[in-house]
Amino acid sequence: MMLDTHAHLDFSEFDADRDDVVQRMRQVGIDNLIIPGVSPEHWPKQLAIAKQYQSYFALGIHPWFCPENVDETISALTLLVSQLRECPRFVAIGECGLDKLYPDNWNLQLLFFEAQLALAHDVNLPIIIHAVKAHQEVLSYLKRHKLPRGGVIHAFSGSSDIALEYTKLGFKLGIGGLIMNPNAKKLLKTVSELPLDSFLLETDSPAMTPLNVTDKRNQPANAVLFMDKIATLQKKSSVLISEHLVLNAMQLFDL
Ligand SMILES: [Zn+2]
């Protein structure tokens, strides 16, 4: 059994051939995926797709999609979370976080990130975090809001030192397409050095397409390539790595 812990299967890039994408994923041995939430406008379609494919899902507001009406949006998220809390496929808050490559709405990002950390704490769920050029800020928030169930820093690309700071706080690191890039030296070093307990397997489909694949979109089936690469870097067999990575996901998200 394998799991893609971060795939935006609801995005329009998959509207034309979503069934085929899911079938390809299953053919290569990936049984299921987690669809992260990104904004109130996206939630209805996200939930419909998650239901259709019986996928796991998270609910949240992504830093690129922060609406101006903060209080109203957080209330809507809180209400939806309470309505769906008992659904066994609802596994996390997010994706949320901070992205310095999108500096225009930085103050909104901070408000939404803090509110979602508080929500994850209140409802006792792990959190899926998008952190780009903002590890120091994210770490300082995580130290202030100690989350009992931790979470994942998705699409992690940083050094071993930063990775260890996160794992000390109960977080895992989502490893995806960037691992196929030989120039991602820091990430390759991190994946070869840290214990296997530190990682989750993910694609971030349709984004983060790895080098040397023909489809311009990333897709969940590609997670197998990343898993093999993690195995090479960790000098272990692919079977052992896949078992361990799925166990990490099952533990974090209580699947
Ligand atoms: Zn994402």
Image (tube, grey):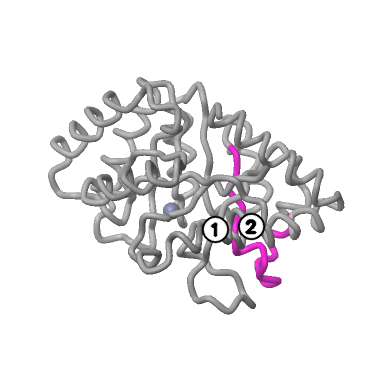
Looking at the rendering, which quadrant does residue 47 occupy?
top left
**Left or right relative to 32: residue 114:** left
**Left or right relative to 143: residue 228:** right
* Circle 2 Cα neighbour tier, 10 Å, few/some/many (<14 / 14–19 / ≥20): few
Q: Is residue 181 shown in magenta? A: yes
Q: Secondary structure at mark 1?
A: helix
Picture coordinates of residue 109, whole percent (x, y) = 29, 47
Q: Is residue 194 above or below residue 229?
A: above
Picture coordinates of residue 229, whole percent (x, y) = 74, 60
Tell me the kind of residue under disc 1.
Gln
The residue where tag 2 is placed is: 27
Picture coordinates of residue 104, whole percent (x, y) = 25, 61
Instruction: Please name the residue shown 50% across and 76% down the image.
Output: 216
Instruction: Please name the residue shown 36% across and 55% down the image.
Output: 10
Instruction: Please name the residue shown 13% across and 44% down the image.
Output: 69
Q: In this picture, which residue range is highlighted in magenta?
A: 172-189
- Which residue is at the front of the view, 105 or 218? 218
The residue where tag 1 is placed is: 23
Disc on res. 85: none
